[in-house]
Amino acid sequence: RPPRSTLFPYTTLFRSGDYILVCGFGRVGQAVCDLLTSKLVRYKAFDLDPYRVAEARELGLPVFYADARRPDVLSIFLKDSRITAVVIALDSERMTTSSVRALRRLYPAMPIFVRAADEKHRRKLASAGATALETGPQESALLLGGALLSSMGMPAEEVMASIEDKRMEMYGDGMRMRSEEHTSELQSRSRSR
């Protein structure tokens, strides 16, 4: 079994019995919850779609009907001191941003993870205090390509290795570019002093 630090970056905050709060139980929220479940990390999720919530409840999943944008709703869920981090998986850029801001006002130290619509939205969410990830169409392309390779009979391990190689190639360049931009910015600041 891998060490807990590879499963949850806030190992000092995460103990047995703790929960992750997932705001939104659509495709992304469900995928996050499935991943958490596979690593035996407990969660509580909520969504505004009553049919989706009812389906999840019928399966025995801890999914509730609630609005992630409302501070009073967030307070009710987060008064449970066992909530150690929040994942916001909402479809609307506006709803996502307002949820991050409401959470940050109420819980300044709470780790918040969120999916951004694009780079501009990622910067906005990061400035509001969230750990924001922008996946964009590249990740979808990798998954579609992987499905195609699997359908052609390529072994699963080979498909996963190909996807991971391509992912590192695609995102590695972006990370180097951002690192170079940051270094240039720091050098410019030091020259202007």
Image (tube, rainbow, N blue to C red):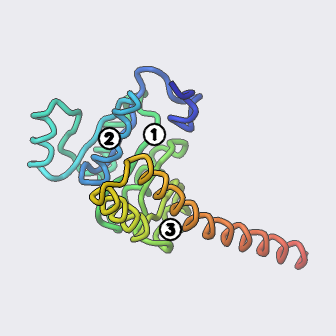
Distance between the alpha carbons at the discs numbered 1 and 2: 13 Å
Question: How many marks on residues?
Answer: 3
Q: Earlier in the sequence, mark 1 or mark 3?
A: 1
Q: Is residue 152 left or right of residue 139?
A: left
Q: In which image quadrant can residue 186 be found? A: bottom right
Q: Position of residue 58 (x, y in %)?
A: 9, 34
At numbered mark 2, what does the secondary structure look like: helix, strand or loop?
Answer: helix
Residue closer to the observer: 5 or 48: 5
Q: Which residue position holds label 3?
A: 124
Amino acid type of the residue that numbered disc 3 sits on in the rendered structure: Lys
Q: Position of residue 50 (x, y in %)?
A: 11, 48
At numbered mark 3, what does the secondary structure look like: helix, strand or loop?
Answer: helix
Residue closer to the observer: 56 or 176: 176
Distance between the alpha carbons at the discs numbered 1 and 3: 20 Å
Q: Quadrant of the C terminus?
A: bottom right
**Badges 1 and 3: C-beta atoms under 8 Å apart?**
no
Q: Which residue position holds label 1?
A: 85
Amino acid type of the residue that numbered disc 1 sits on in the rendered structure: Ala
Which label is found at residue 108?
none
Q: Which residue position holds label 2?
A: 33
- For the point 77% across and 74% down, the residue is 185
- For the point 41% across and 31% down, the residue is 39
Q: Earlier in the sequence, mark 1 or mark 2?
A: 2
- Around disc 2, counting alpha carbons within 10 Å, would you say few (fewer than 14), some (14 to 19), or many (20 or more)? many
Q: Earlier in the sequence, mark 2 or mark 3?
A: 2
Residue reaching furthest to the top: 16
Distance between the alpha carbons at the discs numbered 2 and 3: 25 Å
Residue closer to the observer: 113 or 181: 181
